[in-house]
Amino acid sequence: MTGLAVLFGALLLAGAVYDTAHMLAAGVRRAAREVAERRLVALRLHGRIDAATYRHRMAALARGHRTSPTRPERPERRT
């Protein structure tokens, strides 16, 4: 009987730890999406990406992709 109570207590504790970790992870993912969105807005406002690229990347964020599937091309540096 004592073993059953210990098992039940362990399961209860494991459930509490799982729920806490799940809630914290959701907050981190939400914060990462907000940072990615702010970065895209800044790129658009400073003229570093065009409207079509902005719409494409924002749509990717809306679908849950935190990183852009394509990065803007940078001109090569010549030395």
Image (spheres, rainbow, N blue to C red):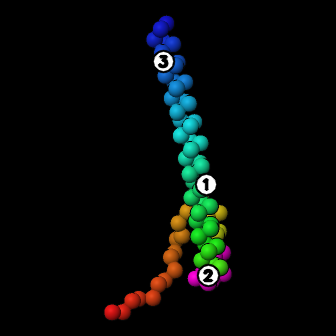
Residue at (62, 66) in percent of width and height: 37
Does residue 79 show up?
A: yes
Q: Which residue is mark 3?
A: 7
Residue at (52, 19) in percent of width and height: 9
Sequence-wise, which precedes: disc 3 or disc 2? 3
Q: Position of residue 1 (x, y in %)?
A: 49, 7
Give the CA separation, mark 3 to mark 1.
35 Å
Which segment did they paint magenta? 46-55
Q: Identify residue type, mark 3.
A: Leu
Q: Which residue is mark 1?
A: 30
Q: Position of residue 7 (x, y in %)?
A: 48, 18
Pointer 2 and pointer 1: residues touching (CB < 8 Å)?
no
Q: Which residue is mark 2?
A: 46
| Residue 77 tag number | none
In the rendered image, the vertical position of residue 29 relative to residue 4, given as above or below? below
**34, 63: nearer the viewer:** 34
In the rendered image, the vertical position of residue 24 relative to residue 4, given as above or below? below
**70, 78: nearer the viewer:** 78
Secondary structure of the residue carrying tag 3 is helix
Q: Nearer the viewer, mark 3 or mark 2?
A: 2
Pointer 3 and pointer 1: residues touching (CB < 8 Å)?
no
Secondary structure of the residue carrying tag 2 is loop
Give the CA separation, mark 2 to mark 1.
25 Å
Q: Identify residue type, mark 1.
A: Arg
Q: Identify residue type, mark 2.
A: His
Does residue 60 show up?
A: no
